[in-house]
Image (tube, rainbow, N blue to C red):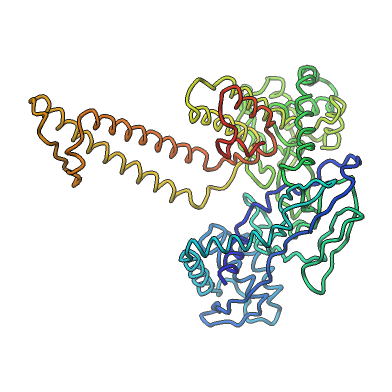
Amino acid sequence: EDNQCRRCQDASDSSSVESEPKDEPEHDGRKKWSTLVHNGVVFPPPYKPHGVKMLYNGQPVDLTPEQEEVATMFAVMKDTEYASKETFINNFFTDWRKILGKTHVITKFELCDFTPIYEWHLSEKEKKKQMTSEEKKASREEKSQQDEKFMWAFVDGVKEKVGNFRVEPPGLFRGRGEHPKMGRLKRRIRPSDITINIGEEAPVPVCPIPGESWKEVKHDNTVTWLACWNDPINEKDIKYVFLAASSSLKGQSDKEKYEKARKLKDYIRSIRANYTKDFRSKDQRKKQIAVATYLIDKLALRAGDEKDEDEADTVGCCTLKVENVTCLPPNKLQFDFLGKDSIRYYNTVEVELAVYEAIKEFCAGKKKGGHVFDKLDTTKLNAHLKDLMPGLTAKVFRTYDASITLDTILNKETTDGTVDEKAKVYQRANKEVAIICNHQRAVPKSHDSQMNKLNEKIDELTAQRDQLNVELEKANKLLSKKAKKRKLVGSDGDAKRRRKLTPEMLQKKLSQVETRIVETDNHKNNKEDLKTVALGTSKINYLDPRITVAWCKTHEVPIDRDKSLTSCL
């Protein structure tokens, strides 16, 4: 039951699966492998009913296992902000009612009381906390043994690690920002939803669920994915299982991506000269392309794609509407829109006067909902970018801008300090890149408690410092009276230890405590500063790892010092 409780929690509040790239890498039709062997995917275990009854209008209600599972998904989220969001509640209840059926007694959300299930959830969490370290270790080892065969694939005979080989558990979709589908039920993925891609001569992975079979088995050596299925929330999106980032195939793919961004360096001057010339073109289409390219270059905006009505109202450069841009004299533009994953992009930036005037012109006479770039769409823009440089896309611009920003800040700000000081420079550079790329996250649930602990630690260290100052003052007074042989008596209950401390020793301890206060305070400020910044996305997807390696070698920073460096390699 403890595992069941944890799965419901993970299914409801795990954003890692949702935020992974869903799109297949650019398909160039080239052969990627000759032989491919793997063991398929791991499915979440079947639901085990706990039998705890929720209340409806004050009375216990009988639920089937399927109905109880969905009720539990909502109940475990009682202490999150989602449980009070109208959109989340409405979507959850709509999907749950389909499972309950038209004749079920539950018809109104406001009469539902999930407290008994929530209390069961808390008790299961407490049981987990009470597990001994030996029990936890045994559980981890058992899980590791079960996963071992799925963790590896053989590509052309070489053993390679697989990335995320787990099929996400059913749960309630959260999305990011104010996503219109938050609260929708992510149904359980079955083998019949999954397409396996494997070598023609390799044994097909055994379907782990008796009586079921894979949707399809393919032998396509022009792609690098091992398995795929349609996203349960956005059916047109596809989720893929790839080899891990450390694999040779992924490494080659990343190298090509960063080489393309590096190649842009040879074209960027002529590209900028080209779009600057067209800012004042009389051809409106050409003028809009020039301004859009400028914004993608300067602000690292995504190109933007059309979407269905039931998808989040997200915006990219080509889909900017007049209400998303405000012109602030003499030459500033204020952008306010929901970007990818419904993350708000809010930025005021100074632009060239010609761009400012062009945006004013594009918006003039248009009503709310009108497109700023009405002569342009992503297809036209991408075709234009490829004319400027083979393979050029908005993402190549973003990768270029991210890597250039990292390189510039590292070269400018790194000094001959300690390794810790140099690592802080790297983190600052990483933060700047994340801000440019609009990589944000929700404030972690544990943030407030972590900040409280750090404040308590600072208070404790401050008290130690004050006590040491008192002791040091006493020690100096005794010395001034030439009473060196008198024993120093502490006033904090630790007299035995204090008697042996000389002024020099006290001063040394005082310096150590003051250093710890500064370090802890810096750590606290850094945590507060980065609470809504997602550093990982840019490190994994946008920062050329060769820049990090070169910087580490030049400034003698161990590459394996911590995750902040190795996560981008």
Could you tell me which residue is drawn at 74 percent across and 30 percent down? 397
Residue 462 is left or right of residue 40, and the answer is left
Q: How far from the left and from the top, in percent, is residue 194?
A: 81, 61
Left or right of 552, for residue 375: right
> Vertically, is 204 above or below 503?
below
**Quarter-of-image position of residue 150:** bottom right
Q: Quadrant of the C terminus?
A: top right
**Position of the N terminus by quadrant:** bottom right
Query: As rendered, which of 516 and 393 lies closer to the eye?
Result: 516
Depth check, front residue: 133 or 562: 133
Residue at position x 48%, y 23% in the image: 417
- Locate residue 545, reporting x and y percent: 68, 32
Residue visible at 61% across and 71% down in the picture? 71
Residue 148: quadrant of the picture? bottom right
Residue 238 visible in rendering? yes
Count of numbered labels shown in the rendering: 0
Residue 483 place in picture, x, y as percent: 8, 28
Q: Residue 546, image x and y in percent?
A: 69, 28
Does residue 394 show up?
A: no
Q: Nearer the viewer, residue 10 or 349?
A: 10
- Residue at left offset 87%, top offset 60%: 203
